[in-house]
Image (cartoon, rainbow, N blue to C red):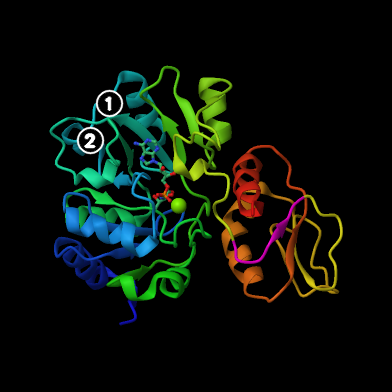
């Protein structure tokens, strides 16, 4: 059965919260990307997330909560982490924290780790859903494992259709890249995945140590091949062949190729981040031999954009 794509009004949110209570999968918008949510305390519901995404069992999930006051039930919040929480939550930050041994979470949520990733999103629909449900919602990005993240309700309906009971449609995601993940069990905290908060975090904490590697990832989002369209991706392109699609940055459209998308005509990195996944979804569907991607400055949001593009280009 196809999922029900519902405009995220109060009735739809109540219906989605009810679906969570009944162990169903519910997709919802956040300010980063769309999430595929399940009751994090319900082992069967959590198993449905892994099955729907084809996600390896060793890849843990982020627990989404409505408020900081709920954290103590699931995790310890060391003082340095509490300061980050006060500054950036609600918002596009995920903190990896020490897991409480008595946390009422399905074991698969944390994939057996002694830590748990927690995020308090700012998107009004995500917040309303979390408040209506009242408990912890495990939610990875709502895409098949390794594929492009969804920044529109329609992306979820297309990619995960039959697995999802309800897709709450809240329009395009705002920041458009997955949350910045910091391992706050380490002092100073270690960056596991760059996101749009990269510059703000460096300003606050100084240069960030990065954790894990492609060989030994600490966050499986660090796996070298990830965020991948079906069409091959060619980076740092300065030209576009007639059978290629063009992903530009401040270059305007390139009429002589199969399709083109300018991430930001004004050369604005936040705008480029906002458009990145929707652009890749669109160009992936254009039937090109390859997606040629213009160089993106390795600065501010560009750090996170290039992280996603490098993984998208891996074969
Ligand atoms: O913006 C986001 O973070 C979105 C929205 C829906 O919140 N979610 C998201 O989830 O991107 P996902 O599953 O696609 O990426 C979560 C990343 C994975 O790379 C996972 O390995 C890592 O978080 N992760 C989860 N728990 C962890 C833990 N305890 N320690 C280290 N990494 C963890
Ligand atoms: Mg993901």
- Residue 152, horizontal then vertical, whole percent: 47, 67
* Depth check, front residue: 291 or 177: 291
Are discs 2 and 1 less than 8 Å apart at CB?
Answer: yes
10 Å crowding of disc 2: few (<14), some (14-19), many (20+): many
**Element class at badge 1:** loop
Q: Judge from the rendering whether residue 213 lies leftward or rightward of residue 73; answer left or right.
A: right
- Residue 119, horizontal then vertical, whole percent: 34, 42
Q: Which residue does the image show at 25% across and 57% down from the upper left?
A: 47
Quarter holding the N terminus is bottom left
* Depth check, front residue: 61 or 126: 61
Q: Residue furthest bottom?
A: 1
Residue 77 bears which disc, if any? 1
**Residue on which the image places disc 2:** 71
Residue 65 appears in the rendering: no
Residue 136 vs 26, above or below: the answer is above
* Depth check, front residue: 25 or 94: 25
C-alpha separation, residue under disc 2 versus residue under disc 1? 8 Å
Q: Which residue does the image show at 56% across and 20% down from the upper left?
A: 206
Q: Judge from the rendering whether residue 35 lies leftward or rightward of residue 241; answer left or right.
A: left
- Quarter assignment of residue 288: bottom right
Q: Chief secondary structure of the magenta span?
A: loop
* Magenta extent: 229-235
Q: Earlier in the sequence, mark 2 or mark 1?
A: 2
């Amino acid at each position: 059965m196809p999922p029900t794509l519902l405009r995220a009004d109060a009735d739809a949110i109540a219906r989605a919260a009810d679906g969570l209570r009944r162990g169903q999968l519910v997709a919802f918008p956040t300010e980063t990307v769309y999430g595929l949510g399940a009751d994090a305390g319900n082992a069967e519901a959590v198993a449905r997330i892994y099955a729907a995404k084809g996600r390896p069992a060793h890849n843990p999930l982020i627990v989404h909560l409505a408020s900081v006051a709920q954290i103590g039930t699931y995790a310890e919040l060391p003082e340095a982490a509490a300061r980050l929480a006060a500054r950036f939550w609600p918002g596009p930050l995920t903190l990896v924290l020490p897991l409480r041994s008595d946390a009422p979470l399905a074991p698969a949520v944390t994939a057996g780790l002694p830590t748990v990733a927690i995020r308090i999103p700012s998107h009004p629909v995500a917040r309303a859903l979390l408040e209506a449900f009242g408990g912890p919602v495990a939610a990875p990005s709502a895409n098949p494992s390794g594929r492009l993240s969804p920044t529109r309700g329609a992306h979820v309906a297309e990619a995960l259709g039959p697995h999802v009971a309800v897709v709450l449609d809240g329009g395009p995601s705002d920041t458009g890249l997955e949350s910045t993940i910091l391992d706050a069990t380490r002092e100073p905290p270690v960056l596991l995945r760059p996101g749009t908060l990269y510059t703000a975090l460096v300003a606050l904490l100084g240069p960030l140590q990065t954790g894990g590697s492609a060989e030994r990832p600490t966050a499986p989002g660090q796996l070298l091949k990830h965020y991948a369209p079906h069409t091959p991706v060619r980076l740092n392109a300065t030209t576009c062949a007639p059978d290629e699609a063009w992903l530009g940055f401040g270059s305007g459209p390139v009429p002589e190729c199969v399709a083109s998308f300018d991430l930001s005509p004004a050369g604005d990195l936040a705008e480029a981040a906002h458009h990145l996944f929707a652009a890749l979804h669109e160009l992936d569907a254009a039937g090109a031999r390859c997606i040629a991607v213009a160089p993106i400055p390795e600065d501010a949001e560009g750090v996170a954009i290039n992280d996603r593009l490098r993984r998208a280009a891996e074969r």
